[in-house]
Amino acid sequence: MNPVPEKSLGPWAILLLIPFVALLWVPFYNSIEPTLLGFPFFYWYQFVWVPTTSILIYIVYLKTK
Amino acid sequence: MSPAPLNWTALLVFVFFFLLVTVLGFVAARWKSGDLGQLHEWGLGGRRFGTIITWFLIGGDFYTAYTMIAVPALVYSLGAYGFFALPYTIIVYPIVFSVMPRLWNVCHQNNYITAADYIAERFASKWLALAVAITGLVATMPYIALQLIGMQVAIAGLGVGGGGFPGVKSLVAQFPWLGTVVNDSPLIVAFIILALYTYTSGLRAPAMIAFVKDVMIYIVVIAAVAIIPLRLGGYGAVFHAVDQAFQTKGSATGLLLKPAQALPFASLALGSALAAFMYPHTMTAVLSSSSVDTVRKNAILLPLYTILLGLIALLGYMAIAAGIKLDKPTGVVPALFNKIFPDWFAGFSFAAIAIGALVPAAIMSIGAANLFTRNIWKAFLRPGTSPTGESIVAKNVSLLVKIGALAFIIFLPTQYAIDLQLLGGIWILQIFPSVVFGLYRTRVHANCLLLGWLAGMTIGTVLAESMQLKPVYPLQFAGQTYTVYIGLIALSANVVVSFAASWILTVAGAKPAS
C-alpha cells in the first residue's frame, strides 16, 4: 500500500479547534440574555457558529492549499 | 399512528412528486454513464461527483428524513437538550476537513471501495477489516429502518392507511398479519420502487434524487420558518410560549440546559460528530466524490445544511406555541404542517419528507452492500469473485438489506429500530481508531486495535443495556457524578486498550504495520 501522501495541516489546524471550545463548553452560552430578534442567546449563539465554522475552515483551506 | 382523515389535495401533490423522483431514479442509470457492471461504478458512481453533486448527496444522506421527524420531536419534548444536534453538526465539519481528504486520497490511489478495504491493507489484517465491516453493517441496518419510520409518519400525515375497504376488512379478520401489511401498503409500494431503481442505477439514483429532495426541503423549511412564526406572533412569542409550557410542566428540562444536562449535551454532540462519518453511507458519499478538493470544499459548504437543521429543530418549538398536543411526539411535524399550511403545500411537505427518506435509505443500502461484497463475500467466502461478480452480489445485497429493514418496521415494534439505532451509534464509534489512526503515523498493531474494538463494543453495549438503552451513563469519579455519552466512554476504553496493548507489543519487540 502507498504511504499516506496527504500533507499535514500545520499550525493553521488550531483554527479548527476553536468551534469545539466554543460549542462544547456549554456555560459560554447557556443563557437567555442577550436576545436577538426574539431568539434567546443559547439559540442564536449556536446559529452564529455555523457560518463562523465555515469561515474558519475556509481560512485553513486557503492557507494549506 | 392516529388516523387523520384522508386529504385528497395533499395526496395528489404527494403522488405527483413521488412519481417524478421515480422517473429520475431510473433515468439516473444513464447519467455520467459508466459500466454499471463494475462495483465502483454502481456503488460509488464511478467516483465522478463534483462539488455540487457531492454537496447535495452528502446533504441528502447525512440530514435524513428521520432527522426531519426526530429532531423537532426531541425539541418538542425535551427543549434545549434536543438542540445538541446543532453543535454536533457544526463540529463535525472540522473533523471531516481534517480526516476525510486523507481517507479519500488513500482509497482513490488504491481503488478501495470501502473503509474496510483500506484497513485490510493498511494493517494487513482481514480480521480487523471484518470487524469494521460488520460494525458498519449492523449500525446501518436500523438506520435504514428509521428512514422508513420517517416515511411512515409523512404518509400518515396524508391520512392514508387504515385498510377501510370492506373486502379487505373481512380478510384482515382472518389473517391478522395482513392488517399490518395493508396499513403499510403505501410504504411497501414506495420501498419496492426505491429498491428497483437502486438496483438498476446504483449510487447515481440517490445522487440525482437528492437534488430534487433538497430543493423541496429547503422550500418547505424556508416557508415554515417565515410563515409559522407570523401566525404565532413572532419568534419572541414562540420562545415565550415554550418557556411558559416547560415551566408549567415543571419538567427537568426547558428553554435552557439545566446544570445536569450540560455534560450529556456536550458529550452527545462530540460523540455524534466523531461517529457521523464512520457510517458506511456517509463514507460512501465522501468516497464517490471526484477529487480531494471536492471533499475539502464540501466541509466548508455543508454547514449550510446545519442552518437548515437548526430551523427544522425550531419546528418543535413552533408546535408547542401553536398548541399542538400529542402523546407520540414523532407526529409533531406533520401535525404542525397540517394545522398551518394549506392542503397542497402540506402534501408538498410530506412528499419532501418521504423523498428525503429515499435518498439516505438508498445510500445506506449501497454502503452496506459494498461492505458485504468486498469485506465479507470476497474476503472470506468467494475470494475469486470478478469485478462483474462483485457488482451482481452488491446489487442483490442492497435488495436484501432493504427488504430486511421493511420487514423489521412492519412486523416489529418501532421502538426496536430506535433502540438499535442508538446502539448502532455507540458501535460505529468503535471503528474510529481503526479508520482514523491508520491515516496518521500512529504505531498501533492490528490485533491491538481489534482488542480495543472488542473492549469498546462490550463496554458500550453493557452500559447502554444497564441504562435501559438511554444514551448517557452517570460515571462516579472522586465523589462527583459525571453523566457522559456512552459512546464516548466506550471509545475512551477502546483507545486506551489499543494503545496500551500496542505499547506492550512494541516493547516486546513486535513491529506495527506502517
Image (cartoon, rainbow, N blue to C red):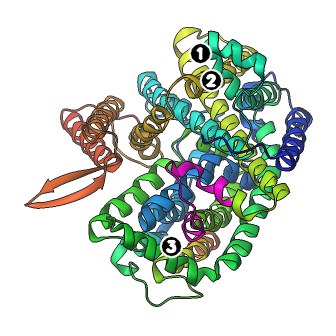
Tally the numbered discs.
Answer: 3
**Of A12 and B149, the residue lying toward us:** B149
Quarter of the rendering containing residue B244? bottom left
Q: Which mark is residue A12?
A: 3
Residue of label 1 = B176
| Chain of the residue that carries numbered disc 2 in the rendered image | B
Q: State if disc 1 and disc 3 touch (CB < 8 Å).
A: no
Q: Which of B159/B408 is in front?
A: B159
Q: Of the residues shown, which amino acid type is indicated by label 3?
A: Trp
Of the two numbered discs 1 and 2 in the rendering, the one whose residue sits closer to the viewer = 1
Which amino acid is tagged 2?
Answer: Thr
Check the residue under mark 3 and report the chain it is in.
A
Observer able to see residue B238: yes
Q: Nearer the viewer, mark 2 or mark 3?
A: 2
For the point 39% across and 42% down, the residue is: B426
Report how far apart the C-alphas of labels 1 and 2 lie in the structure: 8 Å
Q: Which segment did they paint magenta?
A: B316-336
Judge if badges 3 and 1 mark residues of a common chain: no
Left or right: residue B6 versus residue B3 is right
